[in-house]
Image (cartoon, rainbow, N blue to C red):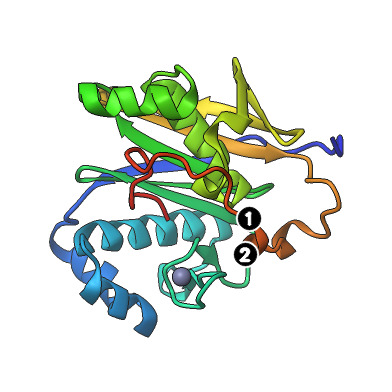
Amino acid sequence: MSGNNQKMHPRVRVEASPLRGRRRVHAIAMLSAGERDRFARAANPERFLAGRMLLRELASEFTGLPLTSIAIDARCPDCGRQHGRPTITGTDLFVSLSHADDLTVAALSESAPIGVDIERRHASAERLAAIREITGGGDVHHWTAVEAVLKADGRGLRLDPRAVHITGGSATLERVQYALSDASERRRSDYVISVAVRLGRRDGEGTERQRSLGSAVPASQPSNSVSSGETE
Ligand SMILES: [Zn+2]
């Protein structure tokens, strides 16, 4: 633990897609060339668009910069294409996105890597069985917390989800601690949302933004029934 005084107030926003009316028009107008390309090819373009809009709004509110000047980079560490973890260009902010059904949730932290995950609260029996298997007995809420931690780590499901240990409002992964919060919303009570913010640095790490995300060796391959294409 570095012991520095981390600010622990992640900003979280949820929205249903498609965006409506002028808001959708604005969201499209602000897409970069790379984002337009992805919007055109995405399996669920409206969800992608909602995610980009939410990230821009959170970053704009936090920095005070106009929405139109918020640029998002999502370079994939493996192949260089724009489908990796999003970052806000020119800032030290940390962001994360997750989707479930028509909902998109975005989270922003000013202090440390953040991960967010949203899941339907009442999972199908099949999915619940897969979650139990992959987590070693956990429920949907537990799974969202695990996924949030894996996303805050940056390696996501390349790590074994069972390596995440959760106790109350915090979690540990490879001796690094994470603060967990439940960001579920009363008006969207069918969904569970968990947020994890990293506390302290990993061993041997330089700066937090220079981690080599591409160097991770795939852990024992988790059963893909719960690894979805839902995270960014
Ligand atoms: Zn890639």
Residue at the spot of label 1? 217
Q: Looking at the image, how many numbered discs can be counted on the residues?
A: 2
Of helix, strand and loop, which one carries label 1?
loop
As drawn, which residue projects farthest toward the bottom?
33
Q: Looking at the image, is 4 positioned above or below residue 35?
A: above
Residue 182, how many percent across, how many down? 47, 25
Q: How far is the residue under mark 1 from the one under mark 2?
A: 8 Å
Q: Specify the amino acid type for callout 2.
A: Gly
What residue do we see at 74% from left, 56% from top? Answer: 208
Residue at the spot of label 2? 214
Nearest the viewer among 169 and 187 is 169
Residue 80, how many percent across, how many down? 51, 78
Residue 102, how many percent across, how many down? 20, 45
Q: Specify the amino acid type for callout 1.
A: Val
Query: In the picture, which quadrant includes the N terminus?
Result: top right
What residue do we see at 30% from left, 74% from top? Answer: 38
As drawn, which residue projects farthest toward the front?
220
- Give the number of the disc on residue 208: none
Nearest the viewer among 165 and 89 is 165
Mark 2 surroundings within 10 Å by alpha-carbon count, few (fewer than 14), some (14 through 19), many (20 or more): few
Of helix, strand and loop, which one carries label 2?
helix
Q: Looking at the image, is 45 positioned above or below residue 153?
A: below
Nearest the viewer among 41 and 30 is 41
The reply, left or right, for residue 203 in relation to residue 173 is right
What residue do we see at 86% from left, 52% from top? Answer: 204
What residue do we see at 56% from left, 38% from top? Answer: 160
Instruction: Evaluate whether residue 70 shows in this view.
Output: no
Query: In the picture, which quadrant includes the C terminus?
Result: bottom left
